Each structure stands twice: as C-alpha cells, then as structure tokens.
Amino acid sequence: MPQTHSSSQSHEDDVPDAPAAPTQAANTDALDDLLDEIDGSLQVNAEQFVRSFVQKGGE
Amino acid sequence: MEEAAGESDAARVMGIETEYGITNPDRSGANPILMSSRLVQACRAWAGQSTTRWDYGGEDPLQDQRGMRRSRASATSDMLTDATEYDEAEQAVTLRRRRGSWEDPAHLNAVLANGARFYVDHAHPEYSGPEVTNARDAVLWDRAGDAIALAATVEYEREEDERVALYKNNVDGKGASYGTHENFLIRRDTDFDDVIKYLTPHLVTRQIFTGAGRVGIGQRGEGAGFQMSQRADYMEAEVGLETTLRRPIINTRDEPHAERSRWRRLHVIIGDANCMDIPILLKTGTTALVLAAIEARDTRLGACELREPVSDVQTVSRDLTLRAPFVLASGDKATALQIQRALLEICRTYVASATDAYVITRWESVLDLLDRDIFSAAREVEWVAKLQLLGRMRSKYAPVDERGEVQDLPWDDARLAAADVQWSQLGTGLAARLERAGSFERVVTDEDVAAAMRTAPRDTRARLRGDMVAARPDLLDAAGWSSVVLDRETTHGDLEVVHLDDPLATTHPLLDSLIGG
C-alpha cells in the first residue's frame, strides 16, 4: 500500500499549515474566546477538580 | 470472492449505548449509584406519562459467540424458548403471571418514547439508543440521548435541590473506565473467526478518526502525554467475553435480542464516547461497511490483517504523527492511514444506500485531511479538536524557566487534565461550547435532535416500542428490545407479552390497533 503526498503539503509535527483556511481562522477565534471564558476557573480550581473527578468502573 | 454492491442488506441494524460519568460538583464522594438512580427518576419526570418499565423477562442468558458456533444445532433449539410459545400465524401473545411489587426494578429503568432505555448500569447512568438502520440515524439518536440526559439533569436539580454533572467520556484518570458500546447485527451464518480476523484491523486503526483524545498515558494516567483514544489503554486481549477486565478488542457476548437462527449481535466495546457528530457517523458507518465486506467474504480483507493487534491498539493511539508502521500478517508494514485507505477502497464495493455513500465521502475526506496536516481535521476529528485547544492552553500558560526561556506547559499540569474532563460535560462542556460556536462539522441539526428525543426511528421495531410508550403508556407493563408487555383488562387476567423478534418489523396488528386507537 504505497503512500504519496502532494508536494505542496508540509509535515511539520504539531504545526498547522499556514496560511490557515477561513474555517480554521474561525475555529481559532472560538478557541481564544473559550480559553478566556474558562481562564479564571481553571487557574483557581483545576487541581481540586481533577482530584475530585472519581468514577467507578462500568460496563 | 467479491459480491456486487446491493448484494448485502441495505439495512444494518445497529445501536449505541453510552455510560455517562456522573458527579455532584459540590460534593465529591457523593454516591454515584444513588445519583444515577435519582437521575432515572428525573428522566421519568421529564418524560411525563410517556415511559414504561424495562422488561427483564426477555433477557437472553450470557452466551459466548464461539461456544454457540461449536454447538449451534443443539443450542439454538434450546435457546428459542420464547419463540416456541409464540404462534406466528395468530400474531398471538404469550401470557405471563403478574409479579409482586417487590420484584419491580422500575426505579432503575425508563423506556422512552424514542425507543431508548435510560437506566442505571453499575454506578453510571446509561442511555441505550433505539435500534437504527444507518449511521446518520445512529448519530441522531445518540445525540438525542445526550439531550435527554441533560434534560434529566435539569429536572434532577429542581427535584433534589442539588447540582449534578454528566460527562460523555470513558475514563476518570485514576484507573476507572466505563464504556460506550456499539452494537451491530450480523448474519448468523458469518464465520465468527472471519469477524475476529478482518474486523480487528479496522477497530485498531479507526481510532485515528474515532478517538476522543485523552490527557495521560496508561490506565491510571501515570505517564504524562496526550493520546488519541480514551479506551486504548484498557484493551488487553484480542477476543473474549469480558467487558470490565481483560477487555477484548472483539467481544464475544452473544445476546442477539432477535431471532437467534438469523442474527448475532456484535458488541463493540473498544470505541470512545464522542461529543462530535462526524466521529459517531464514521465509527458506526465505516464499521457497518467493513462488516458488509466480511459477510460477503471479500478476499481483499486479508491484506489488512495485523500480526500484533493488541499492542497495536496502544501504538496507534499514542502516535500523533500517524507515521508509525504496523506489521501485517503477511510480514509487510503499513501505517494506520494506509490500512484505513485500503479498507475504504474495499468498502466502496458495499455502498448500498445514500447514507453509505455519504459515509464513504466523509471517510475519504477525513483521511485526506489527517494525511495532509492533522490540525486541518479539527472540525471533524475529536482528538484533533481537543489537542488543538489544549495546545493553545500550553502556549497561553507556558511557564518561564530560571534561564528566562519559555517552556510549553507540561502535559501533567492539572489545568490540561481538568480541561480534558470538562471537554465532555453535557451542556456546558468545552466541546458543547465549541459546537455552539460553529467550530465542528454537523451531521444532524439541533431541530432533528429535539424531535428524536420524543420520536423513535420509523424503520425498526423501535417504532412499535416507542409509539406504544408515546400513545398508550396506560396499557404497558414493561418493554424490552424484543418484547412489549401489555397490562390491560382481559378475561384471563394475566400480562400479555408481545414478541418482536424481527428488528426490522415496523408494524404489528395488535400494537398498531392499540396505538391507532
């Protein structure tokens, strides 16, 4: 099963291609807005939240 | 041997079960069984009159698929005890004596007007969606389940005067895992060894588009890092009956909840709970197409067989570059993307409906996006969307070391673990907020989902179950996957069990007369 890549595509790990498509730009704005919204609670409560999230096994 | 398209059944009966994580945000250590039980009560309150109890009378005993195959002839006649009581020509009912109220497990179960079952499973609330015949409907009734569970939390908070939060994920980061199971009916005459051999490579490599993303490596998250799948670290065997320990890639439980001589139910436990539409569409749609190829004994499937599938599950999940090579049974090597592309090409032969064609289109486009640059798939693939958000957090909160150099936030930082869990919270979770902001591709609309909360699929027996619950709950004692139990005034004075052994039967003279009246 040969695999080919078109020459215009880059493969740097973890780095999105620039220039971003319009949908990605919209996505990016939504991410920043979301991070601003949750910033306060994450800074204060993250450790306590993670410690207290305990579930029983299921299935 | 290859069969022409259209040879396989267009309708693939399937369904999804989701166990939700449950917490009281103000009181860690609150009893999850009690909370889940109250949530089912709240769900019943949300449903109003339109609900009934679960029929435990129709459950099949645990049966191993491999054992069944060895002794099919004798076992089948033994197993069909319900069917022998049922007079097909008369569309008759089986009579059942009333049970004592002490036997009533109603507080742990609600059968709903959309054909689903909402109940307590171990220490989790679980939504078992109605039987559907295609991947788009699987998305629709799965998302309807999330909406129902969320509606139940609203009712719960009003009744109990305390908060409750539900999470559509599969791990707590301390070692516990709970499942999201897919069910597919497959033809009984399909060789189960073929299912094991040829479906396994798909289940192992489909993680690249079905994974929900997870912070932490290992069952207790003992290693720092990010991987594609919530469930990968809990898969410890290739084949087996268990779902809670030594979990297998292929589960062999054999309760078809349907005519046993024709069907077996494949119970897939490797999948993640998904908060996005496309992964749900693809995990059910691509798997259904691969099953069609297996049923047709497509010889091309042999090229994809893996030599070490169990360890490959973890390797696929942890290789975010998608470049890791896997050893095939032939000795050749292929990446997960290459195996998926080969399966895609095979499955083109088995397109039998417009939804199948849509699945193929989405499947190919997601593979193209992942191949080009994983972040170009952030609108479609959940682990990528989550990784993109967490990557942004790692820059935003990047610490500066003693030399004044900026470091990415390490993966064991609690803020990343917290965001991983909060991603999946129903209603206010990070995935839900990004979806509302238009960041994800949708397969169904919010209006469709709202309708599917109260309406069953039209093309399976769930229609009969759901419509009875909606129209005549006053006549119902209980309902199960393959039974509707009537409680009405009769000369004999017993309950009447209506058997629905054919999952594709959408009409029934007696039930339709009651629904219509």
Image (spheres, coloured by chain):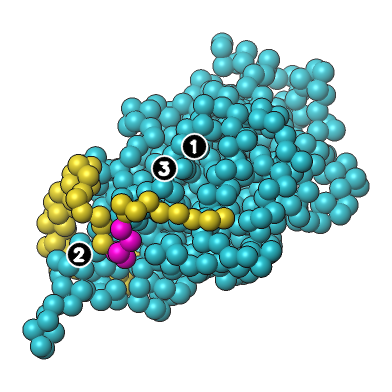
Chain colours: A yellow, B cyan
Q: Residue B116: percent from the left, percent from the top?
A: 52, 37
Q: Quadrant of the N terminus of chain B?
A: top right
At mark 1, the secondary structure is helix
Q: Residue B482: percent from the left, percent from the top?
A: 67, 35
> Dot 3: few (<14), some (14–19), or many (≥20) neighbours within 10 Å?
some
**What is the chief secondary structure element of the magenta stretch?**
loop
Q: Residue at x 53, y 51 (%)?
A: B340
The subunit carrying tag 1 is B
Which label belongs to residue B365? 3
Q: Residue B412: percent from the left, percent from the top?
A: 29, 76
Query: Quick check: B299 left or right of B47?
Result: right
The subunit carrying tag 2 is B
At mark 3, the secondary structure is helix
Distance between the alpha carbons at the discs numbered 3 and 1 = 10 Å
The subunit carrying tag 3 is B
Q: Which residues are magenta?
A: A10-14
Let me know if marks 3 and 1 both belong to one chain: yes
Query: Quick check: B479 left or right of B375?
Result: right
